[in-house]
Amino acid sequence: MADSVITWLPWKDPGSFLGGLPERIEASFYAGGELPPDLDQVEFYVPSYMGSSRVVEMVREMPALKVVQTQTAGYENVLPHLSRDVTLCNARGVHDASTAELAVGLILATYRRIPTAVTNQQAGIWPDDPGIDDSLADRTVLILGYGSIGEALERRLAGFECDVIRVARRARDGVAPITELPSLLPRADVVVLLTPATEETKGLVNAEFLGRMKDGALLVNVARGVVVDTAALVTELGTGRIRAALDVTDPEPLPAGHPLWSAPNVLINPHRGGASTAFAPRVARLVRAQLERYVTGEPLINVVAGPPR
């Protein structure tokens, strides 16, 4: 390794953002605009958060690249562009607070009919009979893809007096394997999707999945849009049997005129699960720690792909 470690970071003042740069780190700013002059020397690269495809595709043009550290938990858009000798690390843990908060917010907004209240307020309407709202109390929430975000979500649900079913790809203590999902879905009042986007999970929420959900159940997607078969969801929503609250969709962004916009019983949020004030300090701590590990030769954390360690 050279005396200086060339890094590309997406912050104009990385020293200030990260609380100081580790020794030997020489940082250039790149967030999708003009290319810095040291492209052929970059060893450590942090693509900008929710940046363009060009920001990700740049990894193909970095011959000295050793590490890519994403700012997202998902990494399916980066992996196809990496050579096998590049280590890929994701941002596991960074989005736990923000995404868990949004999941709770989407549930409460749907259950307590907040969008209807906003519409009535804008129209100056005070309903004569506002009706009875659903409550999270005494309900069962199934968390599909139970990892660090799922743990954060369960902690936040603890005060709502609801039960939680945990489901992940493999069984572990207190967590059911995904093979048991068909028998668990009919028990859930709310199903929260937290699964990564993989070949195994693409279209996981299909007509059969939706058909197993109980009448009146709520599907919350704060994972990836491709996990849900959109056509199947539109059809099921059209029956009025279930509800959905979506932070992500497929396609995304959702084009004007798409049937999801006008589907009944759906709340759509424009992919803002990680976009809160909780994000910056957490990603700063992660990136600084990773840079320090890299320059000192310590093992990196959150490694999801790369050469054998």
Image (cartoon, grey):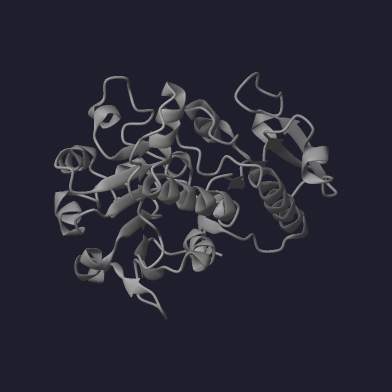
Can residue 155 be seen here? The reply is: yes
Can residue 269 be seen here? The reply is: no
Q: Is residue 164 left or right of residue 93?
A: left
| Image quadrant assignment for residue 37 | top right
The residue at the point 23 percent across, 43 percent down is: 229
Q: Is residue 217 left or right of residue 277?
A: left
Instruction: State the image coordinates of residue 25 (x, y, percent, origin top left).
Output: 80, 44
Residue ranking furthest to the bottom:
173
The relative height of residue 115 versus residue 306 in the rendered view (above or below) is: above
In front of the other: 237 or 161: 161
In front of the other: 168 or 111: 111
The relative height of residue 252 versus residue 228 in the rendered view (above or below) is: above
Q: Quadrant of the C terminus?
A: bottom right
Instruction: State the image coordinates of residue 133 (x, y, percent, origin top left).
Output: 36, 50
Instruction: State the image coordinates of residue 218 (x, y, percent, origin top left).
Output: 30, 52
Total marks in image: 0
| Image quadrant assignment for residue 125 | top left
The residue at the point 33 percent across, 41 percent down is: 129
In front of the other: 270 or 91: 270
The residue at the point 69 percent across, 36 percent down is: 9
The residue at the point 24 percent across, 36 percent down is: 264
In front of the other: 136 or 198: 136
The relative height of residue 17 versus residue 289 in the rendered view (above or below) is: above
Residue ranking furthest to the front:
128
Instruction: State the image coordinates of residue 28 (x, y, percent, origin top left).
Output: 74, 31
